[in-house]
Image (cartoon, rainbow, N blue to C red):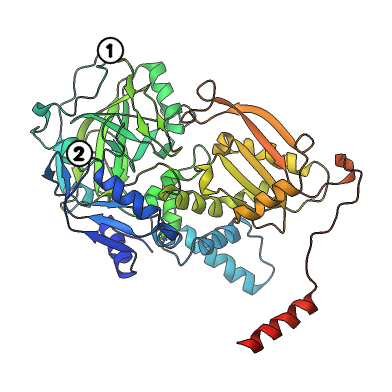
Amino acid sequence: MAYESYAAFLDALEQAGELTRVSQPLATELEITELADREMKKPDGGRALLIEQPTVNGRVSPHPVAINTMGSARRMAMALGAESVDAVAAELGSLIQAKPPTGIRETFALLGQALTLRHAKPKRAKTGACKEVIHRFDAPAPRTEPWPSAPDVDDPTTLDSSPPSLLDLPILKCWPLDGGRFLTLPCVVTRDPDTGDRNLGLYRMQVYNGQSTGMHWQLQKVAARHGRRYYETGDRMPVAVFLGGDPVFTFCATAPLPDGLDEFLLAGYLRRKSVELVKCETNDLEVPANADIVIEGYVDPTEPLRDEGPFGDHTGYYTLPEPYPVLHITAITHRKQAVYPATIVGIPPMEDFYMGSASVKLFLPILRMTFPEIVDIALPAEGVFHNLVFVSIRKTYPMQAFKIMNGLWGMGQMMFTKYIIIVDAEVDVHNTSEVLFRLCACTDPQRDSIFTKGPADVLDHATTEIAVGTKLGIDATKKLPAEGYRRTWPPLIKMDESTKLKIDDYLNKRK
């Protein structure tokens, strides 16, 4: 199912009993975060919230704030237009594993799969709902001197800017020590200047004033690689940011796709309808025609970087200020009835847990193409996205668990994983208690552990150096003699079936 606006998605959530409307005015400064955090901590992620009267510096914004919209397994599935994430994963898996047909039934099945791909390629449109309101800005002169040490959004002279600017959007200040307001669900479009390949990523953006933000693309991200080429040439880098539209766009912006593969292809496939793209007003980048809000601008590689942060992050701690590029805004366009989508991150569980879990399920079939022995993978909420990974495998030869660890550390964002625990196929990796039981019962720490070095998440405050750290892998599978285990591995305690059935019968008769 394709949603033509974020409002349409919210209507679907409301009809399903998955959305709560909040009519009382709530401040975008901390108050929305506190309400949303309490909701996210409820069993199964609580409900989505639509804040109908968000206030910015005491003034009610014309744009409602939607938050926690993908913060449950059911809402995440609805965002993908499906009954469940498992159903989407199964369909994607069958497509990837498709083989030449050997009969008429298999031929028709393969044709059906091919029809689902006809929507993958984006289409171009002349205009769209995202251009119902258009505001252009004059480009500022390049800056050569250092930036001020603090954002200037609280300067009262900027509050009555004309035309309307970033300061008129209900952008959240999430946590007390945050360096300012942050866009937390911006879909950022950049293009490789050499190949023309497009990338869609999700990077937080700190508002400095009505016409500039920070661009927190971390050094391992694709947009950062694009940016480095512009810094080498000295040319201005065009950037487009959009919010809202079909929620599948936001999910695809976080998906671990290979570098160079267009995220809008995945979006078109998932929504079973081609993504209509329109050209921006002030640069040549393209954004979805049905987006709610579009922010256009550029990064000037000739000007100094600017400190961005602090920011209360998904690690549960604040990330401290670090220098990042500045995005200068050249235009803001939006729907007349635009919804501002947001999220918050912090001490888990949060909304990003459900988004990350969906990514793992969808891309597990692709991982199995390289590692067919993998049964399942889980990213527990306590691991704050990718710090801790549980993997179950069908083990058939010595040191197989270590092979999987090293392979996963070389796969995309899995390079940031600090701890990988490998268990046998029968273990439910989504049951943290079961995994920890195997970890404690089936390992000898020295024999079954491996330390290695590699890239680290720049948001990880625990590493000695930024972006560089160590990883720990633990083999909690049944050990084989060739792995140095010279004893007989004992069986797991388990009652025989006949006795279990007899006691079942006894208990049923007592009811």
Image quadrant where one finds the C terminus? bottom right
Q: What residue appears at the point 48 percent right and 62 percent down from the top-left corner?
A: 116
Q: What residue appears at the point 10 percent right and 35 percent down from the top-left corner?
A: 163
Q: Position of residue 366 (x, y in %)?
A: 60, 50
Query: Badge 2 local density, few (<14 within 10 Å), some, or many (20+)?
Result: many
Q: For the view shown, which residue lies furthest in the front direction?
A: 510
Q: Quadrant of residue 119?
A: bottom left
Q: For the view shown, which residue lies furthest in the bottom direction?
A: 509
**Which dot, 2 or 1, sits closer to the camera?**
1
Query: Badge 1 local density, few (<14 within 10 Å), some, or many (20+)?
Result: few
Q: Position of residue 502 (x, y in %)?
A: 75, 82
Seen from the viewer's position, the closer of residues 383 and 277 is 383
Seen from the viewer's position, the closer of residues 484 and 69 is 484
Q: Position of residue 50 (x, y in %)?
A: 25, 56
Q: Quadrant of residue 90?
A: bottom right
Provide the residue designation for mark 1: 146
Provide the residue designation for mark 2: 332
Q: Amino acid at mark 1?
A: Pro
Mark 2 vs 1, N-terminal side: 1
Can residue 60 be seen? yes
Residue 271 placement, left or right of 212: right
